[in-house]
Image (cartoon, helix red, strand yellow):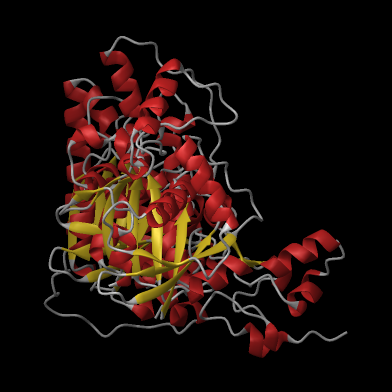
Amino acid sequence: VSIDFSRLTCTNEACDVNATGKCVEGIELAACSHLVKSGAAWEQIAGRDDDNNADRSLTTIALASGECLSVTEAGATLRARESKIFAIIGPTDSGKTSLIGSLYEMFQKQDAPEYSFAGSRTLIAFEQACHPARAVAKLIEPSTPTTPHSTNPYGVNFYHLALRTASGKFVDLLMADRTGEDYRSATDDLTVCTEFVEIQRADTLTFLLNGELLLDDGNRHNVVAGAEMLIQSFIDAQIVDPRQRILFVLTKVDVVHAASQARKRRTERDFAEFVQHIQKLHGANFSEIAAIQTAASPKKSNLPHGFGVSDVLRYWMTPAPAPDEIEDLVVTPRRAMSWLG
Amino acid sequence: VQKRSIVIAGLPESGKTTFLAALWHLVVERRSETQLRLDSLLDGEKAHLNKIAARWREGKAQVRTESGQDRVVSMSLLDQTSNKFRLTFPDVCGESFREIWEERQCSVSLADMLRGCDSLLLFVNADKYQRHLLTVETTAQSKKSKMPLPSNTKVEWNPRLSPTQVQVVDLLQLFRTAPISANVTKLALVLSLWDKVAEEKRSPRDFLRERFPLLHQYLTAQGEAWNWATFGVSAQGGDYIRDDVKPTDAQLRQVAKLKKLDVPSKRITVISDQTTSHDLTEPIKWLLE
């Protein structure tokens, strides 16, 4: 029996399943979370023979999942309104999800003077990311959320926040989060970089350096070398351009502040020297290089929750300085790039 | 006669049915000066309204609206210049709204009601709600008051654990976006059980800003252009007696006191940013403007 695809509805604006019968993201129709699960055509696709389930699917409609956006969905957001993409880059356990969660938490506590929360399409994803630091999780100290492996094509998740600035302008923020292992593998094999659509389109490349590891004698050199290698990989793979900025974030500084004065000073010096070193090596490849320290979800009580996070947001929202001279961009046309505008 | 449809929305136990019960009592009693008054009893199904209003007068808490028992009640009312309004209130159980946030699905009938309505009366319980609280805050509090730290029993994430303000923001977003795509923009936000927080002496808007900052920012930012106002509403004046819970002596005394009032509508308090009254039709009148 043929299926009348024209009767299907998809909540993803970029998908024309009713014309092609195919999901724009290449997902099996029965498994696609964006497809409206009602009507005879859907019943045929789902192949349901359970009467109760069939009845239910006819009386309910599926809503947007509230989970992270795929590349296609992020692309639709970019086209709709002024948007900024921020790639948050770091190895496993460097605090990527904590930073994203803590940024969202800022708006839960009080009205923010500079920026107001104006909506989010990924509230479920934010809530999941924030749960380990919430009292309802019933943990004695906040645990660290980890980036879930994305099931989206290109392996990257986008968290979405709509903000209103003090001047009344709306800006959509798309924060790209992918697993640390994906980024690490780029230093072994440059061809992997072509999949990093978020790096190519990002306004600011935000590199996270784990302060707890930088404090440690056995790990400090690897932390610095890993970040250096990754930047070099991005440059060699030609996926960055001089209009982009780099923000280095030293994370988990609550642990650094709790260490002895000598170790704290050494860690802060290591971080400052690393930033200077990158400025010297790659300053010409980017429009600006800056550094901030954060304790997004401190385990120690020496720093407040979200320490430094508002500085990250302020930096992201500040327009990038125009470089003196920008060479013509080498654009590699690819499907995902075109989706991201 | 102008026909208007107002959807009464809110998570479970946010005071939707109690409001409707007290409103029906108020308009049929006609002993208090109100912005809207009864025109006639000719139209509409009144059995449900009479039943819930009777419980309200008796000081009995409303029975939770069961899933699948959604009703559309209607009232014919007049404003102060004798304009006639036939108002329909789809009274939907709170579980249907919870399902929107937790299950990410909406019944076709509720989606149709939202698409067809002129305005929204959204209820948020000002007393009992899921607060936004961080582990570091509870730990610091325990240490300060020398109380034992909470037990380290990890609770997995569940959407029901999310702060109420997050759930309410997402409800409003989902009403307006595909596939529901309701065109409604006028919104009266009712902070119910206001008697429990009245002693804080804050206006409803200040209360919203301090206790539900995310929701306040979302509405103020006007990203989705809501035309909104906030009302603090105490539709009972205190705790009523529940069928399933043995009342305390204090509760019995309070209900007895409320029942002794010669005019039952004096149990009602409505606070807007400008006025305080017993007139529960004020939020409705604002929605009709």
Height in image: B141 above or below B132? Answer: above
Quadrant of the snapshot with the C terminus of chain A? bottom left
Residue B100 image-quadrant placement: bottom right
Height in image: B278 above or below A72? Answer: above
Q: Nearer the viewer, residue B288 or A1?
A: B288
Q: Give how far across and how far down residue A47 sits, in percent.
A: 83, 69
Q: Give how far across and how far down residue B171 sits, in percent.
A: 45, 59
Residue A164 image-quadrant placement: bottom left
Task: Say which residue appears at 64% left-offset and 55% top-offset.
Answer: B69
Q: Give how far across and how far down residue A197 sits, in percent.
A: 44, 70
Q: Nearer the viewer, residue B157 or A187?
A: B157
Q: Give how far across and how far down residue B244 sits, in percent.
A: 60, 29
- Viewed as shown, does residue B238 lie left or right of A1? left
- Viewed as shown, does residue B190 lie left or right of A312? right
Quadrant of the snapshot with the N terminus of chain A? bottom right
Number of on-image labels? 0
Q: Nearer the viewer, residue B213 or A307?
A: B213
Residue B152 visible: yes
- Viewed as shown, does residue A301 lie left or right of B62? left
Residue A314 image-quadrant placement: bottom left
Residue A85 visible: no
